[in-house]
Image (cartoon, rainbow, N blue to C red):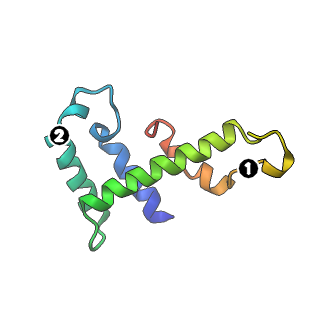
Amino acid sequence: IETTVKFIQEYKTHECLWDFTLAVYKDKNRRDAAYVKLAESMGLPDFGVAEVENNIKTLRSTYNQEKKKVADPCRRNTLHYCLVPTQHKYWSFCPLCGVLH
């Protein structure tokens, strides 16, 4: 969990990777440089740009799935299908609320 929190904190510092309202969001060179810096800042062996991109994709996907569960916990209107997200998982993403769409 500590590694994930660190990754999220580092990801937030590179706005060109997530803030599509900025002009630098469309700058591929700037984004590529941010991926490299993010990978280096993690200080993990064999953690490169591909792992950064995969982690971002996974975090965004998980965040959106959990957000959807909270918004509509009983999609099929039966108790059997009521989905309640794991609070720990959902709330650990709070730092992502403004970052992941």
Please give left or right for residue 31 compared with residue 94 in the image.
left
* Residue 48 point in image, percent of width and height: 25, 63
Residue type of the residue flagged with mark 2: Lys
Above or below: residue 22 compared with residue 82: above
Q: Is residue 41 visible?
A: no
Q: Which numbered disc flags the more N-terminal residue, 2 or 1?
A: 2
How dense is the environment of label 2, judged by Cα within 10 Å: few (below 14), some, or many (20 and up)? few
**Residue at 31% across, 38% down:** 15
User: Furthest-front residue in view?
Assistant: 76
Residue 66 left/right relative to 18: right
Residue at 74 percent across and 49 percent down: it is: 83
Q: Which label number is shown at residue 28?
A: 2
> In the current view of this chain or complex, which residue is farthest to the bottom?
45
The reply to whether residue 29 is visible in this rendering is yes
97 vs 65, nearest the viewer: 65
Q: Which residue is mark 1?
A: 84
